[in-house]
């Protein structure tokens, strides 16, 4: 059994996905999720406020990655890719952490730029299964950044990463000029597009989709998302955990995430958003398949 692993070191959580790779009858490589581990480290709190990852958080990250490496060894993973995104991009001690991770966990960690992050998420190729009559705005909201990609006739038309994310908003580190830049960018690239629909990825939109009770493969409407948002802000943080059964590390970030999706949908007139339940780790697995097998 061929197994690949993806490690995503985000601003809110660190994830490991171990996937079983197989070839279907058409000769196309596919994967099945075997094991998914998520550890809510919140590296963004350090990075966005202090511009460095603290010794305590660094230690927790290294311990997490040692555990991930042990799991990868036990599962006989043959290829992996470990990517760190927005928080590590901004941490001035990022390069020291990379060395420490290599030394103690024997993992090669790559701090990726926003455009590469957008490309990895795009490697999921969700557009292939979509209605060709529509154009799509792909929105991936993370703790530190939001990646936007626009598809016209199933082709990537434009994509850009913006430093707007859930942890940044909670820490009051989102800047007015970045919001303006994102608004201008998305409006200029979508103003002439007819039949524009959204695609949302990331842990928060997956959770929002589950709360909505919509059937799989059905889109989530702007109005329903707005209603969920109004419900969420009607509860205190404690109530979101006790009444809505949200994890503590999800209960706070889900509100700013919802605000980002609603704002972008409002700017572009997108009335509905499809939620395929894939994210960064899925993109990494698809990228590994492309780089190692499809060549």
Image (tube, helix red, strand yellow):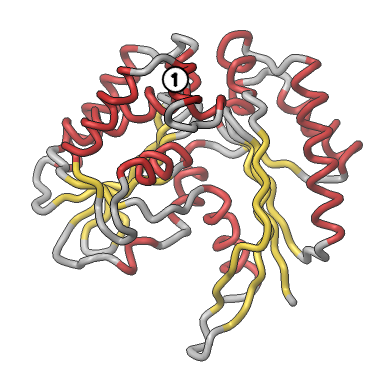
| Quadrant position of residue 95 | top right
- Residue plotted at (38% across, 56% down): 276
Rendering coords of residue 52 (x, y %): 68, 15
Rendering coords of residue 242 (x, y %): 49, 25
Name, please, the residue furthest toward the right.
103
Left or right relative to 156: residue 96: right
Nearest to the observer: residue 44 or residue 32: 32
- Residue plotted at (64% across, 23% down): 43
Q: Secondary structure at mark 1?
A: helix
Q: Is residue 248 above or below residue 32?
A: above
Rendering coords of residue 81 (x, y %): 68, 52
Mark 1 burial class by Cα count in 10 Å: few <14, some 14-19, many 20+? some
For disc 1, the marked residue is 239
Name, please, the residue furthest toward the front.
243
- Residue plotted at (37% across, 61% down): 126
Nearest to the observer: residue 88 or residue 20: 20
Q: Name the quadrant of the N terminus.
A: bottom right
Q: Is residue 26 above or below residue 281?
A: below
Q: Is residue 128 visible?
A: yes
Left or right relative to 292: residue 252: left
Q: Is residue 279 above or below residue 172?
A: below
Left or right relative to 91: residue 280: left
- Residue plotted at (44% across, 9% down): 172
| Quadrant position of residue 94 | top right
Q: Is residue 83 visible?
A: no
Left or right relative to 242: residue 100: right
Rendering coords of residue 237 (x, y %): 46, 17
């Amino acid at each position: 059994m061929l197994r690949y692993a993806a490690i995503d070191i985000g601003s809110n959580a660190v994830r490991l996905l171990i996937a079983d790779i197989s070839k279907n009858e058409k000769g196309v490589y596919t994967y099945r999720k075997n094991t998914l581990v998520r550890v809510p480290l919140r590296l963004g709190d350090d990075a966005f406020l202090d511009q460095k990852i603290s010794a305590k958080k660094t230690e927790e990250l290294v311990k997490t990655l040692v555990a991930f490496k042990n799991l990868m060894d036990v599962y006989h993973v043959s290829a992996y890719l470990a990517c760190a995104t927005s928080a590590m991009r901004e941490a001035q001690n990022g390069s020291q952490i990379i060395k420490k991770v290599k030394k103690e966990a024997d993992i090669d960690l790559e701090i990726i730029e926003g455009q590469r992050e957008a490309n990895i998420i795009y490697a999921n190729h969700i557009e292939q299964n979509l209605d060709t009559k529509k154009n799509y705005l792909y929105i991936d909201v993370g703790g530190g950044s939001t990646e936007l990609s626009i598809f016209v006739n199933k082709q990537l038309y434009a994509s850009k990463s913006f430093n707007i994310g859930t942890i940044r908003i909670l820490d009051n580190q989102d800047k007015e000029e970045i919001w303006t830049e994102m608004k201008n960018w998305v409006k200029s690239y979508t103003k002439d597009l007819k039949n524009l629909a959204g695609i949302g990825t990331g842990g928060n939109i997956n959770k929002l989709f589950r709360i909505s009770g919509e059937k799989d493969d059905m889109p989530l409407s702007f109005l329903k998302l707005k209603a969920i948002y109004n419900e969420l802000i009607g509860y205190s943080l404690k109530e979101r955990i006790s009444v809505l059964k949200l994890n503590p590390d999800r209960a706070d970030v889900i509100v700013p995430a919802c605000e980002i999706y609603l704002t972008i949908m409002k700017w572009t007139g997108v009335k509905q958003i499809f939620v395929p339940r894939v994210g960064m780790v899925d993109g990494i697995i698809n990228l590994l398949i492309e780089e190692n097998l499809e060549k």
